Image: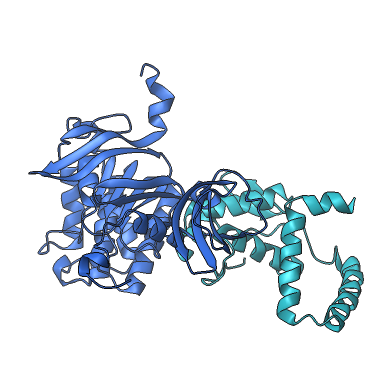
Chain colours: A blue, B cyan
Amino acid sequence: MNDVGTVLTDTAIETDGLGKRYKRTWALQDCALHLPAGRIAALVGPNGAGKTTLLHMAVGLLRPDAGSVRIFGKDPYSNAEVLAEIGFVAQETPLYRDFTAQELVTLGGKLNRTWDAALARERLSGLGIAPNLPVGKLSGGQRAQVALALALAKRPRLLLLDEPIAALDPLARHEFMQTLMGAVAETGTTVLLSSHMLADLERACDYLILLQTAHVQLSGSVEDLLETHRTLVGPRTDSEQVPGVAEVIRGSHTDRQSTLLVRTNGPITDPAWIEHEVTLEDLVLAYLAKADTRATRTAWDVKA
Amino acid sequence: MIEFVLDGRSRVSTYMQLVLQVKQALRVGLLEPGDQLPRVREVAGSLAINPNTVLKAYRELEIEGLAEGRPGVGTFVTGTLAGSSLTSQAELREDLVAWLLKAEAAGLSPEDITALIDTTMRAVGSGPVRKEAR
């Protein structure tokens, strides 16, 4: 890795064999990711999949037990200067609840090397947030907006958000995403946002990282993923050998018909199969089901 | 200035919905050459969508010669769609009405007809039929 320059500056997050273990359980294992700069990435997966662990290692709060994580080419655990380039909004947007928004903006200026207090004040006033109320008295949606404004005041090159909208009502969720997308349009910040609700992210994200049971199930640009996956409906088949299909991700069968969600490696030429485009949600559900290790009916002694 | 609206139930991709809305506005004369399109920041912020999606839509309009980006200023309409194809449209419509009557006489239901048009359009779009027609 001698040609550091361009390659690394184009990559916001790079992990290689990354793992974290709590006692004997791996919370994240063999995680290989490459998030190009300028993307808005969704980090999706069920609760306990390892999303928070990954984010905490990316922001240098946790030290990896295996492999490595690099942020703009640097290890965040041992490089304080790279932390100045990362904005982080932790789960449930923890803030000092007795402080007012105004005080938090001032405090941030004392704690951070780069700090655009004017920008934070402008954002918060634009959102109509009371400057002199303790943030503990604000609504959940407003508190989330304060946390976002504070993270953006660092003018970060990379913004990490851990389930920022999970606890919000639909309107507050929409408003949060509006602020975030507006800010990204202005700054070009790379974003990695974790959530278990894909619907809210579908229009915001152009990159997907799907975690399940401590492993990366799928990652890539949304455009490429949608381009290379299809749902095929056709006559019942038990064979997974359909020309143009690289892999069957999920299949369901009746006595006459098979429905397959597939990854393609060429055009589906067999006219027996009707091709449908997939949505991001179809894709995520199929990959999650594929790796699902739920107890089968036989384990419950129930007839299928 | 126009304001974009997204159809949440549409299967049409977000960027294409933006492109189609600009084209529709051009067809009905709501947008004219010289008009400015909403800024990327505003569209991304009001619809809560990825700014790259807006950029992609505007780039598509530029490629089609309908708009032009001026660095630091914004994106402006340069082309027009109003009236250009109206005469040929009338003629095509007549052909289509005649064809629809024929399809009805052959016993096709409206669903049959839509399905036929759909599959044919897809087949033509993907190549082979276009070659046959030549």
Q: Is residue A165 visible?
A: yes
Quadrant of res A20: top left
The relative height of residue A172 versus residue A73 in the rendered view (above or below) is: below
The relative height of residue A8 versus residue B42 in the rendered view (above or below) is: above
Q: Name the residue nearer the viewer: A193 or B114.
A: B114
Residue A27: x %, y % from top left: 18, 47
Quadrant of res A138: bottom left
Quadrant of res A286: bottom left
Residue A207: x %, y % from top left: 43, 48
Q: Residue at x 40, y 23 (%)?
A: A5
Quadrant where the C terminus of chain A sits is: bottom left
Q: Name the residue nearer the viewer: A240 or A59.
A: A240
Quadrant where the N terminus of chain A sits is: top left
Q: Residue at x 51, y 63 (%)?
A: A259
Q: Residue at x 17, y 69 (%)?
A: A133
- How many numbered discs? 0
Side of B53 where B102 appears, left or right: right
Side of B100 where B114 appears, left or right: left
Residue extending furthest toward the top: A2
Residue A199: x %, y % from top left: 40, 65
Side of A96 where B11 appears, left or right: right
Q: Is residue B48 visible?
A: no
Residue extending furthest toward the left: A23
The relative height of residue A17 versus residue B83 in the rendered view (above or below) is: above
Q: Name the residue nearer the viewer: B85 or A247.
A: A247
Side of A148 where A186 appears, left or right: right
Residue A283: x %, y % from top left: 44, 57
